[in-house]
Amino acid sequence: MRLFFKIVLGIFFLVFLALAIFLIPPHLQTQAVEPDLPSEQALRDLMSVEDGPIAVHYVLSASQDVRGSKLGHTSFLVEWANGTLFMIDAGMDAEGAAAFVELLKGIGGGGEGEFFGTVGDQLGSHLARVKGAGFTHLHIDHTQGITSFCETRGDGTALLQTDHQRDLHNFNTSEGAGLVTGSCLSRGALNGTELLTNETFPGLGLVALGGHTPGSTLFVVGLKDRLWLFSGDTTNTKADLLTNTGKGFVYSGLLVPENTGRTQKLRLWLRSLNKNDDIDVIVSHDLRALQASGMPQFGQ
Ligand SMILES: [Zn+2]
């Protein structure tokens, strides 16, 4: 019995050691990403640039029931008067979405899923208008759709990406990073420090966030009368943002190595910005909150 106890203890120790060896490097990597954030005024300045964007739309590629709420896989399209579109996140194709449904069913809490078409399919004849693209982060559920997008779009879309997102990868961003690097997107230049911009897309800004992943990025869109902030997966629901609720140890410690001090800081920062009547924070996967925001769906 004593021997049996020792063997169990030994196995437990080895599993713990293997987990630690596997998880410590990505944790150290994401802990090191805490860049300065821009002021509210710097964000608001995007609302008054010349020839700024005229609208923002969302595209829903797939959804899944998760514990009574709707998890959406969304892309966002920023539109300018000259016809230019910028795409934030690429969603997934049918196969990727089906695999993700099974993943969430396996982890627990995931219900039935529905697929509505890739972002490329839903854009149809508007595809050639997409002159730029970027990703809130490189997890597969935000990047996998870029492959089918490129099959129909071909060249001509600039990738706006922070250096953090280009350079810092871990076990659950490297696959998406590979898809983006090998895609039809060609990297465009960014100017600025805390708030990064590109002159082809006036009124659009990028902020290096970190927290959820080392390369997590906030996309800021300044319409004349409204500022949209695309926070990716900094939180999984808008309610978690408004109540400053973290994702728990299993998620942030084991499944997705997060910088939880940073995500807490980001929740508070985004929540305070969201208190303004003319500023809306969009949480990538919270479909009901997205629909409540009043943002139109593309083509409708
Ligand atoms: Zn996600």
Image (cartoon, rainbow, N blue to C red):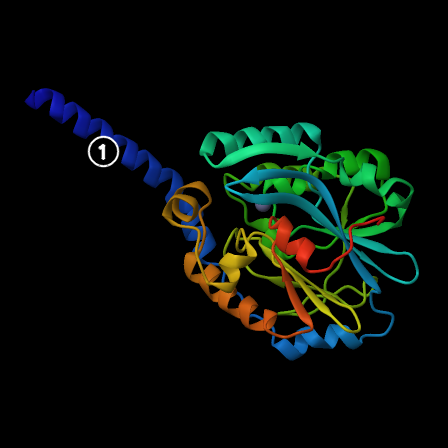
Label 1 sits on residue? 13
**Residue drawn at x 62%, y 76% as measured from the top left:** 40
Where is residue 107 drawn, in percent x and y?
46, 34
Quadrant in which ligand 1 is drawn: top right
Residue 55 lies, with reference to residue 103, above or below; the image says below
The location of residue 130, given as percent across then percent down, is 84, 49
Outermost left residue: 2
Q: Residue at x 44, y 58 (%)?
A: 245
- Total marks shown come to 1
x 28%, y 36%: residue: 16
Which one is nearer the viewer's eye here, 247 or 182? 247
Query: Does the closest atom of ligand 1 sit within 8 Å of the Cβ of label 1?
Result: no
Report x, y in % for residue 54.
84, 65
Given residues 169 and 77, the one toward you in this image is 77
- Let me know if residue 181 appears in the view: no
Question: Residue 57's x, y, as percent?
Answer: 78, 54
The amino acid pointed to by label 1 is: Phe
